Amino acid sequence: MSKYWSQVVRSIEPYVPGEQPKDKTYVKLNTNENPYPPSPKVLAAIREAANENLRLYPTPTCDELRQCIAQYYGLAKEEVFVGNGSDEVLAFSFQAFFNPGIPILFPDITYSFYPVYSALFHIDYKVVPLNGDFSIPVEQFFENNGGIIFPNPNAPTGKYIPLEAVEAIIQRNTEQVVIVDEAYIDFGGESAVKLIKKYSNLLVVQTLSKSRSLAGLRVGLALGQKELIDGLDRVKNSINSYTLDQLALAGALASFEDEKYFQETRRKVIATRDNFSASLTASGFNVIPSKANFIFISHSQMNADEIYQRLREKGILVRYFKKPRIDNFLRVSIGSDEEMATLLQALNEIV
Amino acid sequence: MSKYWSQVVRSIEPYVPGEQPKDKTYVKLNTNENPYPPSPKVLAAIREAANENLRLYPTPTCDELRQCIAQYYGLAKEEVFVGNGSDEVLAFSFQAFFNPGIPILFPDITYSFYPVYSALFHIDYKVVPLNGDFSIPVEQFFENNGGIIFPNPNAPTGKYIPLEAVEAIIQRNTEQVVIVDEAYIDFGGESAVKLIKKYSNLLVVQTLSKSRSLAGLRVGLALGQKELIDGLDRVKNSINSYTLDQLALAGALASFEDEKYFQETRRKVIATRDNFSASLTASGFNVIPSKANFIFISHSQMNADEIYQRLREKGILVRYFKKPRIDNFLRVSIGSDEEMATLLQALNEIV
């Protein structure tokens, strides 16, 4: 604590990202990174963009990338916002659409950045407890509130709710913005993007970090009707006119242009997840059904905390959250088939 | 205006960056970009970083880059913060060190992002009028206040105050943070970095966009004692754990490692500025003495607005601010000698 810190900095409790240890080479299954490299076309586009034009500012309106994403999703360019990872896009969204006063709603077990944003921007919130099976109690998001945000699939559970349930929440909240955080939607879920033309209160947030293997490039996006995108633009242009550098713009564009590679790699991750989930179940683990690139697991004979430590000793990193209701679960990212075989063997040795 | 916009988004007036028109090729002297390309070593480092590791998140603590910058300036790694351009670093600094209540102080003519940040974060401010010659009235920053920020050299005037004047302001404000925005310091000024060990209330903000020819890479930094850097970290980690992508990290590192190229190019810009200023003065222009990579000029016979328009028709972009006290001035970025010769000829034709 410093006497120079502002009131807000004294009061916040920052988010803690998954560890990125450098002491040795781990089988790294703790931050939901994709085991496959980015498309070779993405890497080529970045290398080509590493030229003397880096002396110039990027286009602040990111027109080319937004146009490309708009076309990909059947939207207009004015319905697309891009930012420095979906975390930045989410932070801007909290500022743009949520207020102090009537609390916003999000699940009690969810992405742990939501309460952090709320504290930073003085936004009141109320958490909605998930059902016992970690499913989202849809009707509890129908009550009077100041806005809604939830991931679909949810994190860190991996649980997905069908598009009809998402639409029911949007329909019952037409006076507030409903943010659907689709960081993991490409791993088997159905996106709410197709509802955008119908609902002016819907904002869909996505990222290139997971399904497009670009966690190191920092690109996220928001999709919604023009009024919402304009609101995000106003926040961005009050903080930083250029949040995406020229290399990120070039790489992201190339990623959306290489549909074949995207489909191949996301299908491989899905297949690995489903096979690994079945093997774990056979080994006596409780596996929450997942539509994400991670699974949420527990074991009746051994504490998650202990499994986490034992795996770490064996050079395998998974994520453990010491929080109520989920402190006996581990979140395991889906790596390559080889990595999951290594993990399965280790788990069978431990439990 | 949308019913979905938050109160803060309704009230803010976003910053408007200099235009980046794509309709034709302009002599572009409107956004203070460097006429020289980035160091070839920077481009090589970026190309090398465009590899399969982009599937992984960057190191959230940016240790390697911070260590390199710390060594460059004779500081500790814990005294260095890096972010997505100095605009993001400034926005985080406003959140981290300034409060609603007692107003902060900045000059009436200065970087126009300061009032934008203040509005976004509900920070009260009072502007201190510059003297008639656009110099900063140092003593007027000694009064009771909630914090201070000013650029040195100032923007858009290019006027510089010597380090003793900067130190006097820091000394008279030990209970508040004094932010010295040194975006243009490498073009002939003396940095306040050397005062950091002495004053715990000093934060120096710099950018790689201007003197290191990397506007397209989006890297800025803040230097100060550990407590201040910790405050910035708390804000960053409440918004976005990874604001610098792997390519920006690699390129920025290579830039600080190529001192020779940095010295050569910044000296060329300084020489061009001084020659061009002398020529303009000889042509009857009023040129404010500049220590930046731009100059602030006016002419007694023709309105700045008209000169701006006539230059634009000739394919030359400069920056015109339609604001009180400076609406008869133009801000002209220092380009190559060839670009400045083209501009000089055009100006002589116009006036």
Image: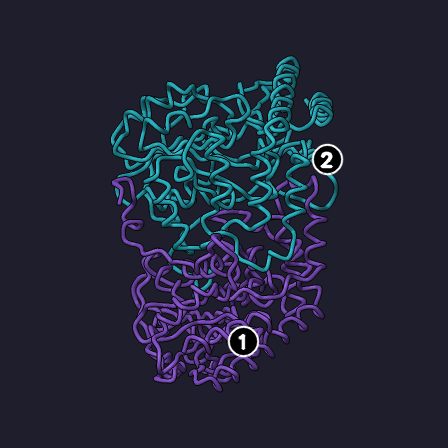
Chain colours: A purple, B cyan
Q: Nearer the viewer, residue A294 or B177?
A: A294
Is any atom of residue A338 visible in this view?
yes
How far apart in space, not on screen, are marks 2 and 1 (Cα)?
A: 46 Å
Graded by Cα atoms within 10 Å as few (under 14), some (14 to 19) or many (20 or more), the crowding at tag 2 reads: some
In the shown orientation, is residue A258 left or right of residue B216? right
For label 1, the residue is: A192
> Type of residue at label 1?
Ala
Q: Is residue A167 visible?
A: no
- Compared to A124, does B263 lie above or below? above
Query: Is residue B202 toward the left or the right of residue B27 in the image?
Result: left
The structure residue drawn at horizontal position 51% and vertical position 42%, both measured from the top left corner, is: B85
Give the mark toward the camera: 2 or 1. 1
Dividing the picture into quadrants, the one containing residue A74 is bottom right
Q: Amino acid at mark 2?
A: Gly
- Is B337 situated above or below A132? above
User: Which residue is painted at 56% across and 62% down in the image?
Assistant: A209
Whole-percent x and y of residue A33?
54, 64
Label 1: which secondary element: helix
- Residue where numbered disc 2 is placed: B315
